[in-house]
């Protein structure tokens, strides 16, 4: 594992060389990701990426990323660590090629210049992996949480005025 990953990379060149990047990057360096996190961006992301070419000699990046992100539970509003363990499968598209030409399991990576900050690529993948809503499975500090064994709805509202509508249903 590399102790320090390079700051700038040329993904196409690395792909044609069959280069492998394995190491850790500090979350504190990813400023766009900070707005989704709470309590600062402590911790690091571990990456294991292989730059290679596919059968048609198109440059690709395959690998994985793991980290734990400090995020805010939307139910109890407490900080929690959200585990991220994602697979990365990117294909670098040359100018003029559209995403319609991509194989099924790949996402497009359009490069605007030959040298790209590695942090930007990692941060983009992390932002795309963020959940829409972060929730604990059970919030210990939430005293208003409903129990898991909820009573049937019919028992809760025995005199439901809409219960007559269930009798009007036509059975097929």
Image (tube, rainbow, N blue to C red):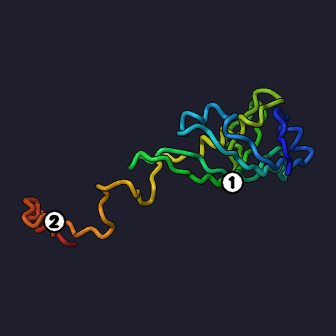
Q: In the picture provided, is 136 more to the left or to the right than 24?
A: left
Residue under the point 72% across and 53% down: 64
- Total numbered labels: 2
Mark 1 / mark 2, whichever is N-terminal: 1
> Residue 150 appears in which quarter of the rendering?
bottom left
Q: Residue furthest right?
A: 17
Residue at point 77%, 36% (across, down): 118
Res 52 seen here: no
* Residue 145 appears left or right of 117: left
Residue 15 in picture, x, y percent from top left = 86, 44
Q: Is residue 136 above or below residue 32?
A: below
Q: Which residue is mark 2?
A: 156
* Residue 36 - label: none
Question: Could you tell whether 40 is left or right of 96 in the image?
Answer: left
Q: Which element type, helix, strand or loop, lies under badge 1?
A: strand
The kind of secondary structure element at disc 2 is helix
Is 66 placed left or right of 148 in the picture?
A: right
Where residue 97 appears, x then y in whole percent?
Answer: 74, 35
The structure residue drawn at horizontal position 55% and vertical position 33%, both measured from the top left corner, is: 35
Q: Quadrant of residue 77?
A: top left
Q: Work out which quarter of the rendered image holds the C terminus and state it.
A: bottom left
Q: What x and y, as percent, mark residue 113?
A: 80, 27
Residue 38 in view: yes
Mark 1 residue crowding within 10 angstroms, few (<14) / some (14–19) / many (20+): some
* Image disc number at residue 87: 1
Tell me how far mark 1 sits from mark 2, CA to CA.
Answer: 45 Å
Verify CB contact (< 8 Å) between mark 1 and mark 2. Answer: no
Q: Nearer the viewer, residue 107 or 140?
A: 140
Q: Nearer the viewer, residue 167 or 112?
A: 112
**Residue 106 vertical placement versus 94 (above, below):** below
């Amino acid at each position: 594992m590399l102790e320090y990953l390079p700051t700038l990379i040329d993904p196409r060149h690395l792909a044609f060389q069959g280069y492998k990047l394995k190491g850790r990057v500090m979350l504190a360096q990813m400023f766009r990701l900070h707005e989704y996190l709470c309590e600062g961006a402590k911790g690091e992301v571990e990456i294991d990426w292989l730059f290679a070419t596919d059968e048609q000699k198109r440059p690709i990046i395959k690998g994985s990323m793991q980290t734990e992100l400090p995020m805010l539970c939307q139910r109890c509003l407490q900080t929690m660590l959200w585990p991220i363990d994602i697979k990365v499968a990117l294909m670098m598209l040359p100018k003029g090629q559209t995403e319609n030409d991509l194989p099924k399991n790949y996402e497009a990576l359009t490069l605007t210049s030959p040298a790209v900050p590695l942090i930007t690529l990692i941060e983009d993948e992390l932002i795309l992996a963020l959940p829409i809503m972060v929730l604990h499975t059970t919030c210990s500090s939430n005293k208003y949480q409903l129990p898991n064994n909820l009573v049937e709805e019919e028992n809760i509202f025995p005199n439901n005025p809409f219960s007559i509508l269930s009798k009007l249903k036509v059975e097929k």
